[in-house]
Image: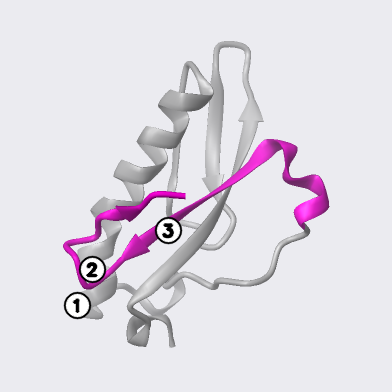
Amino acid sequence: MITNKKIITLTYKLYPESKGYSVKCLDWQCVHTQGETILECKKNAKEATELMLPDLKNGTLHKLDYPKIKPHNKASASNTFTLTFDLRKNYQIIPL
């Protein structure tokens, strides 16, 4: 189970909108956000994920809200990005 992991890498997908982008985590359905630029989307995705990590670590999520990390097709990576989190270090992101 993911709560036993110390480091997790999640994949996010960007969706173009009329103004900016929306972002959805492909591994964790309850993590989504938006932003005007790609950089802002990445920062917002990091923040949205970090807000969920305490509940993940404490095991207080509903059973359907746990992340389901799976391999993704890297060939279509032009609109995807990954973020890595170290659960041992107060959820600090690991630089890619």
Q: Position of residue 46 (x, y in %)?
A: 36, 44
Residue 59, image quadrant: bottom left
Residue at x 48%, y 63% (from the top left corner): 9
Amino acid type, callout 3: Thr
Q: Alpha carbon of mark 2 to alpha carbon of mark 3: how far?
A: 17 Å
Residue at x 61%, y 35% (from the top left corner): 14
Q: Helix or strand or loop: what does disc 1 sit on?
A: helix
52 left or right, relative to 7:
left
Q: Helix or strand or loop: what does disc 2 sit on?
A: helix
Q: Helix or strand or loop: what does disc 3 sit on?
A: strand
Q: Position of residue 8 (x, y in %)?
A: 43, 69
Q: Alpha carbon of mark 3 to alpha carbon of mark 1: how far?
A: 19 Å
25 left or right, relative to 40:
right
- Residue 84, numbered label: 3
- Residue 58, numbered label: 1
Amino acid type, callout 1: Asn
Most foreground residue, 73 or 31: 73
Q: Nearer the viewer, mark 2 or mark 3?
A: 3
Q: Alpha carbon of mark 1 to alpha carbon of mark 2: how far?
A: 5 Å
The magenta region covers 74-96
79 left or right, relative to 46:
right
- Residue with the mark numbered 2: 55
Most foreground residue, 23 or 72: 72
| Quadrant, the N terminus | bottom left
Amino acid type, callout 2: Asp
